[in-house]
Amino acid sequence: KETIRKSGSDSKNKKEKATMQFATKNQMKPKAFVSGGVRAQTLRQARRAQRKAPQLQARQICCAAEAKTAEAKTYMATYSEKKAVATGLEEYEKVPMNTFTPKKPLEAEIVSVERIVGPEATGETCHIVIKTDGNIPFIEGQSYGIIPPGTKVNNAGKEKPHAPRLYSIASSRYGDSYDGKTTSLCVRRATYWCPEKNAEDPAKKGVCSNFLCDAKPGDKVMMSGPVGASMILNEEDPNAVHIMVATGTGIAPYRSYWRRMFLEDTPFKFTGLAWLFMGVANSDATLYDDELNEILENYPDQFRVDYALSREQKNKDGGKMYIQDKMEEYADQLFDLLENGAIMYVCGLKGMMPGINGMLEKVATSKGKDWSEMQKDLKKKGQWHVEVY
């Protein structure tokens, strides 16, 4: 993952927005959680919190290259009915790992590159579809290595190929076309703003992210992997509560989750609750929000989204609203869900972890419990998954 220094200024002009309710009514009956262990009291608290939650305006994503309708977006799907998928991708004896290596990578092909943020976003993020012909299979929650073209000179003065950069996979194992022949990545273009020049310094831009965001259909891309097991979707209990926490492109693995949960007709029959916390700078920087709208419309009792917009919202102390601040609004509810079997995933910038841990530790202390010991227990039970950078 590449470190990004953000640049640009906040938008002063509001553009036309479509109403989106990020907090759903959440009218699930307690008996629906027959094995999830969620108490009726916890669900009542969830419903009260939903009624108090403010509505958030969703912006329409604008492509810088060309205006596109919602139907034309390459990543967009309708969730009114389940989609048929390819066969033969459910039976894995073990999680696929390093099918291809940096020394022996897979040559794949770019299918499409699409900007998925608005014009006032604090950076450019693209949804990239890659044709793999199913030769590098993976499980939801894993990552691929992308090896950018060209070479670099190391500290010893030797010229070597670039090392692979890891990107969380933003599609399910079936890809955006449901045939298992493609994969998708969510990539933010990494740039460096030089304060002395008061401009971007192209010499310090992210080699791999810029290669991917500038790629054209038909371009070749070298891939390694898949790798990673820490963020693999836990499917042991289809009735479980999944709490997904992301900043920026950390949303990528969760897109693979929600497509498997709500879109694809697979043996995994999800009946639980998926709750997404998403942190970005402003409304234009939100990712896949039109797809999230589709899920909220079709699965209002099973899906919930809360956004933390640091440049548009204020926390309880009047400061910027970061993701840990948004989660703190539901601290007791989140803690109760974890105690009753919920699974939490955290993906994105590591700077959010102290705030998240501090929030949960505060709740644990108020209940006479040791958060550090509880966290160890959650990890042992497969309820705590973290991938930060």
Image (cartoon, rainbow, N blue to C red):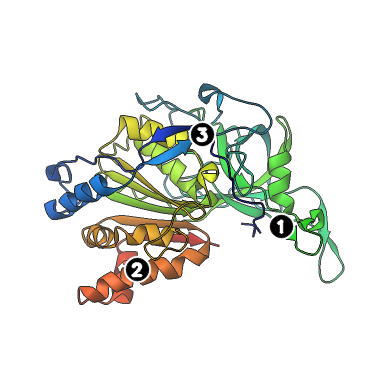
For the residue pair 91 and 266, the one nearer the viewer reads as: 266
Q: What residue type is labelled 2?
A: Met
Residue 104 in sight here: no
Quarter of the image where the C terminus is located: bottom right
Badge 3 vs badge 1, beta-carbon distance below 8 Å: no
Task: Indicate the position of residue 353 as horizontal and vertical percent values.
Answer: 45, 66
Instruction: Please report the residue visible at 51 percent of the width from the left and 25 percent of the height from the top.
Output: 70
Identify the mark nearer the N-term, 3 or 1.
Answer: 1
Q: Which amino acid does label 1 sit on?
A: Ala
Q: Name the residue under label 1.
A: 163
Badge 2 vs badge 3, beta-carbon distance below 8 Å: no
Drawn side of residue 18 relative to residue 30, left or right = right
Foreground tag (2 vs 3): 2
Residue 359's tag is 2
For the residue pair 382 and 352, the one nearer the viewer reads as: 352
CA gap, disc 2 and disc 3: 36 Å
Task: Indicate the position of residue 233 as horizontal and vertical percent values.
Answer: 39, 49
- What is the tally of numbered marks visible in this picture? 3
Q: Name the residue under label 3.
A: 175
Indicate the secondary structure of the residue bearing disc 2: helix
Drawn side of residue 366 relative to residue 290, left or right = left
Identify the mark nearer the N-term, 2 or 3.
Answer: 3
Identify the mark nearer the N-term, 1 or 2.
Answer: 1
